[in-house]
Image (cartoon, rainbow, N blue to C red):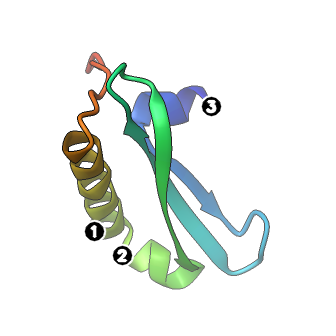
Amino acid sequence: MARIRREGIARTSDERVTGASGLAVPVYGSGGNVVAALLIAGPSARMRANAKSNERSLRWAAAECTRLSGGVPPVQARI
């Protein structure tokens, strides 16, 4: 959980269903709290092959959902 909070993304690979993987990122509300999540899932091989693009697109979409709904992402220190 600490890694998910630090990185801002949850990753699964073959956990519940063999051959299936997923990514999830939070959408924030006006108080900076998580109000929703966006998730993409697909075959593990394709998810791995497109990991960077998938993560970048999913983060962008969540940031847009946050912005368009008046949400405020929390400030996260970068080390």
How far apart are the alpha carbons under marks 1 and 3?
Answer: 23 Å
Image coordinates for residue 64, horizontal then vertical, percent: 22, 50
How far apart are the alpha carbons under marks 2 and 3?
Answer: 24 Å
Residue 49 to residue 4: above or below: below
Q: Quadrant of residue 55?
A: bottom left
Evaluate if marks 2 and 1 touch, with contact meaning CB atoms under 8 Å apart. yes
**SS at mark 3?**
loop
Mark 1: amino acid: Ser
**Left or right side of 57 for 2:** right
Q: Which mark is residue 50?
A: 2
Please give the name of the residue rendered at 38% of the width and 67% of the height, measured from the top-left corner: 51
Evaluate if marks 1 and 3 touch, with contact meaning CB atoms under 8 Å apart. no
**Left or right side of 8 for 77:** left
Please give the name of the residue rendered at 79% of the width and 66% of the height, measured from the top-left corner: 16
Residue 78 to residue 48: above or below: above
Mark 3: amino acid: Met
Q: Which mark is residue 1?
A: 3
Label 1: which residue?
A: 53
